[in-house]
Amino acid sequence: MSSPSCALVWFRDDLRLDDNPALKAAQASGRPLALAYVLDEESERLRPLGGAARWWLGRSLAFLSAAIAAKGGRLILQRGRAGDIVPALVEELNAAAVYWNRRYGAAEIAVDTALKSALAGRGVAVESFGGSLLHEPWTVRTQAGDPFRVFTPFYRSAGRQAVRTPSRADDAWSFAGSARSDRLDDWALEPTAPDWAAGLRASWTPGERGARDRLAAFLDDDLAGYATLRDRPDLARTSRLSPHLRFGEISPHQVLAAVRHAADAGTASPADTEKLISELYWREFSYHLLFHFPDLAGTNVNRRFDAFEWQDDPALERAWRRGRTGYPIVDAGMRQLWQTGWMHNRVRMLAASFLIKHGLTDWRRGEAWFWDTLVDADPANNPASWQWVAGSGADAAPYFRIFNPVTQGETFDPDGAYVRRFVPELAGLPAGIIHKPWTAAPEVLRRAGVVLGETYPFPIVEHPAARERALARFARIRGD
Ligand code: FAD
């Protein structure tokens, strides 16, 4: 065999060309590049992507393929066990080294570790990099050397560490001969029968350019005021960068640098900048938890919750999924999720709290529904947030915090605009009543064309009774 020729870059959750440390190092090696993505739905314990995330992945890969083609190269697409495919590619391409950015889930780490030693055994070097987190999870430790379980000290400690400056890909591209590649369309990542993705297509532009444009729009329009307005689903003043970050179309380093630049330029206040940065660090904290509590989506971080008596209520769960609970703010959120693949953070908290506390439903069932329907379904953020709401997580909301969906709606959607948008059958109700239609006078309902129990449901559980029931159930595991 001729001497090894190329540098193989294996893309995973880092579907971008700029600020991609693995790609940058491969370019710096001076060898011609081979670029590949492997759709691995077979390796043991890997969690298959949900439907909305598959849709996103398909679009993002199409964008990445086109961006690489514009440089004169080709993204190799192969499907199957990464542990088989990557070594076969190394052989077919006669690669000297493989480059990737790290992943942090237990199953992914197992795949990568096994591959690294298998390739090393054949004399092929693997170089891995931190690409998608500001801080590698094992580098942030308490003074005793343990992982953090509480956000604030984690943030304080991580915030003291240096963060690399984002880089651009080199302009000089040189590509190796390509290998066999699947056609992206043959992976059928986008739904066809039925095609439920129209709302997703209307809402999002996956890909590195879409991510960059979204960041720019956020900096121009929404960063000013973010600290106070981020909790208002009716105003939509958050960045909506989450799916772009999830698939690595933009790195947190790029977001951080841009936000700091806005602060330095005086176009963003310290309060707004600091709030956004702390949200980026909540993402870091979720990954810290995932790394140190590998079964984050399956096991309570607080093991006392193992004894919690969850309830099976298929009717309530179905109503929750379809946005028919009778609580307008919860229903608006669940329908926003179904239509657009995304839900505002405040409403995610309310919807999750409703399922867990009003419905006494195991948080894992809600986590699984979000996993299937969110375009930003994230292996760390999703289970960490569900456990946070349940009270079973690290640094979780206290179990006795049971959101009142009416007062929460009135506080965070004061004019009812969010409800009107996603629950159009209530659009005719005045603001003062829209979050509690069952209290409206018959004449008000008639004028708005609302027939409770027909056009819109009565509340599926009553808040005060559900609250008492949840408190009593939680008290049992507290030992009261
Ligand atoms: P912004 O407010 O603009 O924040 C910027 C970025 O910071 C986000 O893109 C995100 O990467 C990060 N971030 C913001 N809030 C949080 C948070 N509370 N925890 C961790 N990171 C955060 N986020 C996901 O990315 N994927 C999920 O699967 C996910 N599931 C969730 C489930 C529940 C029950 C809850 C309560 C929250 C969940 N979140 C999840 C966190 C949060 O709701 C989203 O990150 C946020 O709504 C994304 O909108 P944005 O990009 O406009 O956020």
Image (cartoon, rainbow, N blue to C red):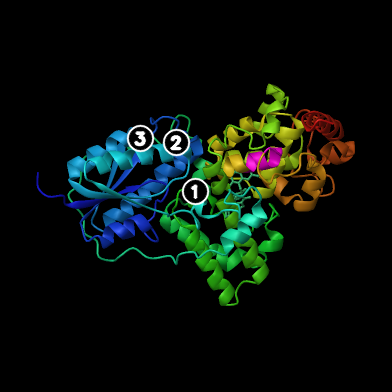
Q: 426 or 27: which is nearer to us? A: 27
Going 81% across and 32% down the picture, which residue do you hit?
475
Tell me which label, 2 or 1, sits earlier in the chain. Answer: 2
Mark 3 = which residue? 187
Mark 2 = which residue? 107
| Span colored in magenta | 385-392
Q: Gap between marks 2 and 1, in whole Å?
A: 17 Å
What is the secondary structure assignment of the residue under circle 1? helix
Q: Position of residue 379 (x, y in %)?
A: 52, 41
The residue lying furthest to the left in this view is 1
Q: Position of residue 139 (x, y in %)?
A: 51, 54
Q: Position of residue 266 (x, y in %)?
A: 60, 77
Instruction: Give the amino acid at mark 2.
Output: Ala
Q: Position of residue 433 (x, y in %)?
A: 84, 45
The residue lying furthest to the front in this view is 144
Note whether 448 is above or below 266 in the view shown.
Answer: above
